[in-house]
Amino acid sequence: MRPGPRPLILITVDCFRADHAGFLGYDRPTTPFLDSLASQSLVFRNALATGTPTYYSLPAILASRYPLALGRDLLGLAPDETTITSVLKQRGFQTAAFLAANPYLSPRFGYDQGFDVFRDFLDGGTLEFTLEHGSPWEAGVRGRANQVLSRACHSVAPLGVAYDELYFQYCQQIAARDDESLDSLRRFPSADVIVDHAIAWLNENSGSPFFLWLHLMDSHSPYFPKQQALEAMGCGPINACEARYLNSYWARGDLSAKRLQGKRDGVIALYDAGICWADAQIRRLTEKLVELNVWDQCALAVTADHGEEFLDHGGRFHPPLKLTEELVRVPLLVRVPGCGSSDSEHPMGLIDLAPTLLDVLDIPAPASFRGRSCWSQRVTGENVDRPVFTECLYGCTNPYREENRAGPRILAVRKGDDKLVIDFASGTEQLFDLKSDPRECSPLPLDAAKPARRHLLECARKHVAESRKARDVDLRFESQLRDLRLEWAHSPANTPN
Ligand SMILES: [Zn+2]
């Protein structure tokens, strides 16, 4: 038995929706290792992101704070904000983070705080690229003549459609390279690269208590998985050209959902292979922990920042336009050696994750954490039925743009099987009974389930009032100051020639 507190590893897999995990019922072998781990873990079957996408989810995961609590104009963690990392650092943990180049998880947004080693693989290139969606085939600048032709064609509907199709095929032709491979097309470091770095760090640091955070991007679009993962899932070889075509097609803004549907299965196969590769690399990491004699003590949590949509409600990717289950329900398993397994059906917000993990380590949560531990209730069998909130700003697909951060809020409140989604722009709300309608196909009529609707509306009102009342003005001020400094540093007058 190792002396001192348990080491802790947190792995967040970007875009990993819950219903694509084997241990949560998916019929494809995406997660053979996590499935085996689930039988010795605490599994939350209804874990819900506190915000979506990445930039609205991570403040809750690391700081147990609602994403809009400091004000809708601010992103990321505030300077010196208390996080699970800073708490563990104070307790003498060695801390390291290896994050697969998600531009919203960078020092610019405070995510390096408390880490001794922080690698975001962005190599300084963090700014101004729209990660959350965007069409690769539209990314190229069209020539002037082409723009004129495009406008002319689009003035006559059938011609416009034909033009778009031809232009798409033309872009595919010129994008083709003889030497292209899935590896060369991939935009983010794959999980094996991240795990290699983690292993190198563990070789030096596993002798003392440590906190290691990995963020994997294998299931994030554009979907260019490792070929081995496609084979492991029995998808057969998909070559780079096919994968590029599928990704480009899937990103087209000119097609109806009906036309996109034809490529859906192919795109999902690529996405699933990304999850499968992450799973294989998590297995490799744990094998190293066994070798280092740490696995018997190590607590491990695996989850996601949000899910991903494949036309479930007509959309793709994960822009903050709605809070449907495919976007907010994420896998969550917490493995603590010697503590057995259990399965929880109760909705649990990721805002509760950091306090839960501290509880696992027997460390009290700081007062600033808004969530509560779900660890003790596993032991006591206490049935805590609190509302779970998820929020984002409507249409904020590029938060680098200030005007994007001024939109109205969307708020989902979940309690039991009831889910109320409030659209602050239109002032409307929809109530779903997820038991009878798990795919959220039909909101309940306005005159149905009135007590439940009234109760969830009251929860939402309290949540919004509380987030204003409890706003930490010092953290808000520090965040604003950081943004001002960055703006000043990047203003043309201060840019060296
Ligand atoms: Zn994300």
Image (cartoon, grey):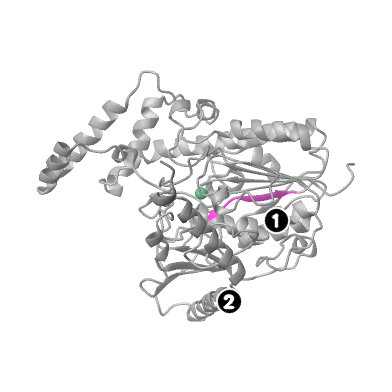
Q: Earlier in the sequence, mark 1 or mark 2?
A: 1
**Residue 480: percent from the left, percent from the top?**
52, 63
**Residue 66: percent from the left, percent from the top?**
57, 65
Q: Is residue 370 visible in this depiction of the protein?
A: yes
Give the residues in magenta. Answer: 329-335
Q: Is residue 332 highlighted in magenta?
A: yes
How far apart marks 1 and 2 lie (CA) works out to: 22 Å
Residue linked to disc 2:
466
Instruction: Kindly identify the residue that appears in the image at 83 percent across and 38 percent down.
Output: 207
Q: Is residue 366 highlighted in magenta?
A: no
Are circles 1 and 2 on residues that touch, CB within 8 Å? no
Instruction: Using residue 235 as the reference point, say whether residue 145 is left or right of it.
Output: left
Residue nearest the viewer, comparing 157 with 117: 117
Residue nearest the viewer, comparing 273 with 66: 66
Q: Quadrant of residue 343?
A: bottom right
**Residue 171: percent from the left, percent from the top?**
26, 32
Q: Is residue 349 visible in this depiction of the protein?
A: no
Query: Which amino acid type is shown beneath numbered disc 2?
Result: Glu
Is the C-beta of the residue carrying label 2 under 8 Å from the nearest atom of ligand 1? no
Instruction: Kindly identify the residue that appears in the image at 53 percent across and 31 percent down.
Output: 233
Instruction: Kindly identify the residue that appears in the image at 45 percent across and 26 percent down.
Output: 184
**Residue 173: percent from the left, percent from the top?**
27, 26
Q: Secondary structure at mark 1?
A: helix
- Majority SS type along the magenta span: strand
Residue linked to disc 1:
84
The N terminus, quarter of image: top right
